[in-house]
Amino acid sequence: MFRQASRLLARTTASRRSRAFSSDVPATPAQDSNFIESWTKVIPNIDPPKTPSSFMAPRPATPSSIPTKLTVNFVLPYASELSGKEVDMVIVPATTGQMGVLPGHVPTIAELKPGILSVHEGNDVTKYFLSSGFALIHANSVADIIAVEAVPVDHLDPALVQKGLADFTQKLNSATTDLDKAEAQIGIDVHSAMNSAITG
């Protein structure tokens, strides 16, 4: 019984190793020649259907050496703040903590929390306050940052931030339902992050 189990286990681990990693997938999509051949035998007068991969742009090749610059695309639902901008580094407010991204960073997907996005270009640092979103870091030193809402930090009004923080604190204290408490807590978290962005 144990001999059979070890043989089956060895077979499953060998089959797992034969699967290609996403980095091993070719940049140009391969066509299934067996399918196309079978299709033309059955229906010779109609072109074979296209698969989803035939509509996708080929994945950019991973560079053999680390580039000197990071290409950043920073978009909002209503605008594109940065498009193909080459910078030295970005720091994003990930839910796991502040994450610095340099050229050659490992491919990553990070959820963003309310906080500061810092874009470093030489000695210039541009700071944006983000409400939430995602950062997608690609192997070819491209960072796509998608935010729900963002504003340059210098456009934040400290008086309005303090007023909002006080209002949401009062709402939390007077909340009676779980929904009201959750909404008030989100307001406090966002306004506290804005306050830290202004003062910090």
Image: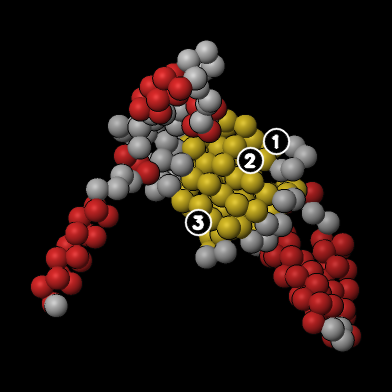
Amino acid type at mark 2: Phe
SS at mark 3? strand
Residue 193 seen in render = yes
Whether residue 192 sits left or right of residue 35 in the image: it is right
Above or below, comparing residue 9 to residue 42 in the picture: below
Q: Position of residue 63 (x, y in %)?
A: 35, 31
Please give the name of the residue rendered at 20% of the width and 66% of the height, measured from the top-left corner.
9
Q: Residue 199 occupies which quadrant of the picture?
A: bottom right
Would you call the spot at circle 3 few (<14 residues within 10 Å), some (14-19), or many (20 or more)?
some
Question: How far apart are the two marked residues, 2 and 3, measured between alpha carbons?
Answer: 16 Å
Q: Looking at the rendering, in which quadrant would you find the N terminus? A: bottom left
Q: Cβ–Cβ below 8 Å for labels 2 and 1?
A: yes
Tell how many labels. Answer: 3
Seen at 61% across and 57% down, the residue is: 112
List the residue tagged with mark 1: 80
Of the numbered discs 2 and 3, the one sitting upstream in the chain is 2
Q: Is residue 57 above or below residue 79?
A: above
Reading the image, the residue beneath label 2 is 74
Percent x, y of residue 47 = 52, 17
Where residue 74 appears, as percent x and y from the top left, is 63, 40
Q: In the picture, which quadrant includes the C terminus?
A: bottom right
Per the image, label 2 sits on a secondary structure element best described as: strand
How far apart are the alpha carbons under marks 3 and 1?
Answer: 22 Å
Q: Counting residues from the N terminus, which is met first, the one under dot 2 or under dot 1?
A: 2
- Who's the residue at 48% across and 15% down the image? 44
